[in-house]
Amino acid sequence: MTGSPLPWWMSAVVYQIYPRSFADANGDGIGDLAGIRAHLDDLAWLGVDAIWISPFYPSPMVDFGYDVSDYCNVDPLFGTLEEFDALVAEAHALDLRIIIDWVPNHTSDRHPWFLDALTDRSNDHRNWYVWRDPRSDGLPPNNWVAAFDMSAPTWTFEEASGQWYLHLFESAQPDLNWDEPGVVDAMHDVLRFWLDRGVDGIRADVVHCIGKDPQLPDNPPELAAIPHSALNDVPVTHQRLRDIRNLLDSYPGDRVIVGEVYLLSTDAVATYYGNGDELHLSFNFPPLYAPWSEPHWRRCIDSTVHALAPRDAWPTWVLSNHDNPRHRSRYDAAALFRGEDPASVVRRSELRARCAAVMLLTLRGTPFLFQGEEMGLLDAVIPPDRVVDPGGRDGCRAPLPWDGTDHHGWIAPEGIEPWLPFPDESSTRNYASQRDDPDSVLHLYRRLIACRRRHPALSLGDFVLFDAPDGVLAYRRTVDDEVCAALINFTDTTVAIDHHFGIEASLGRAPATVAISSDGSGEGSPFDGRLLPDQAVVLTT
């Protein structure tokens, strides 16, 4: 490729850390910053380029850190600001970039701003939140429903002042009023605080919600049951994002902003890239809900390409995160429901997760890995008495098993259990055992990431889908004179890829060599034209 250097985040592999569940260094059963520092070498060994750390700010933990009570500090559960600074320095020494979560739409109801707003209608901070009088019948100001509990309104009545306040999520997460200049200034100062400490990027939580229609109109009846956070899409947000982008661009080093724009349309999400002057990246959520089906994935890819191409916007790809069931658990949930043999289903789910890893790390765009997917983890089974999350997301947030001991590498004084149970299979499916096993999912991820580095076509190249047998997704990646291809078999049968489908022609030369195989077979050998059930390969020439 020619021209000026491209931003680092275009070719990066980003690894998401949910700090409560990554690693515990002090024995209280909750992961912390020191635990992350202790495993930076492991992440560097895996080969990722950046880590995104979910919220670690002081918080009452109603929504486990997404209800922030102090934007410019570290919750004592996780450590101190000094430990955060040490984490940044040690990560940078290993060529790992740091992205942190920023929660601009709402605060905790324990934040000093909101506590001040409660004291008097005329208080300076009152207008930092969204307040409205009741309707004439005393009901909330509109028909918006909240996330998590779609039977609940997005409004809570505050008896002392006789007004309702807006919260698109939990009642303990009042929405900030970005129409108030003081809010904009304060939130920009939060960004400067962390950028000045050396972070390389920001993941902006539900950033599409920082603009609201000032009329706060009812949602149409046909949409009234959908959480308003998935519908909120107003023009004023785009100017606010341009201002935020200008702030980040004023810092050296290609600081990046990744937006969570949780809207129902990929075309709508694409508008939040602006004309290269709003978000650098925006999460693309359809893959989080796509079943293991070639037509579904082809539609996800086509819709993304068509939505982003006119803006020359860079895609993102994600299989799992802290808000959704792990993809290995998702891909065979229907089979378990039908009563198929659990052992067969579990085995098949790993094969499919391996294929998905090949796809994730070879599609055009920036891939985001969620901690534990590199080990092929399933969701944990959470007993009713251990459920803690208001959104039912505990299973995917279970602690990472670092070894096969009883406490899986977590420091565990007698009587202290981690905050959630470990996933099933942790005695054998853990970091230590997989690092010792060259055939493990962990080593597959490491080989894939290394292959991306060796072959720029896989990270920065052009992307073209080409014909393949039914149930097989096939695409070519090219940059300059380098050509690679990926073939993913979504079926449970062996598929012949004969000359009719033009693999050699698609690669531009023959023979094709298997650079990566999802099951490890045939790597380094010529491709024999066969894809096994639930197998994926990366081909080079």
Image (cartoon, grey):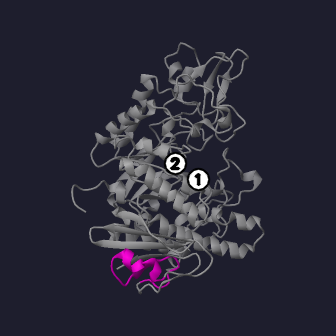
Q: Please give the name of the residue rendered at 69% of the width and 18% of the height, measured from the top-left corner.
A: 159
Q: Quadrant of the C terminus?
A: bottom left
Callout 1: SS? loop
Identify residue for label 2: 78
Please state the horizontal and vertical placement of residue 240, each as a whole percent of the image: 41, 32
Furthest residue in direction front, as rendered: 500
Question: Of residues 100 and 216, which is closer to you in this image?
Answer: 216
486 relative position to 247: left or right = right
Q: Residues within 10 Å of mark 1 (few under 14, many from 20)?
A: many
Mark 2 or mark 1, earlier in chain: 1
Q: Residues within 10 Å of mark 2 (few under 14, many from 20)?
A: many
Looking at the rendering, the stretch of residues picked out in magenta corresponds to: 498-523
* 282 displayed left or right of 246: right
Q: Is residue 156 above or below residue 252?
A: above
- Does residue 195 lie above or below 236 as drawn? below
Q: Secondary structure at mark 2?
A: loop
Is residue 519 located in the magenta-colored stretch of the structure? yes
Residue found at x 39% / y 82%: 512
Q: Label 1 belongs to which residue? A: 30
Residue 457 position within the rendered picture, expressed as x and y whole percent measured from the top left? 34, 67
- The location of residue 343, given as percent across then percent down, is 71, 75
Q: Amino acid at mark 1?
A: Ile
- Pinpoint residue 405: horizontal percent, then vertical percent: 62, 71
Q: Residue 291 colored magenta?
A: no
Q: Does any portion of residue 103 appear in the rendered image?
A: no
Q: Is residue 501 visible?
A: yes
Front residue of 350 and 62: 350
Q: Residue shown at 72%/36% (left/top)?
A: 151
Q: Are marks 2 and 1 in contact (CB under 8 Å)?
A: yes
Q: Is residue 37 above or below residue 232?
A: below
Q: Marks 2/1: CA distance? A: 8 Å
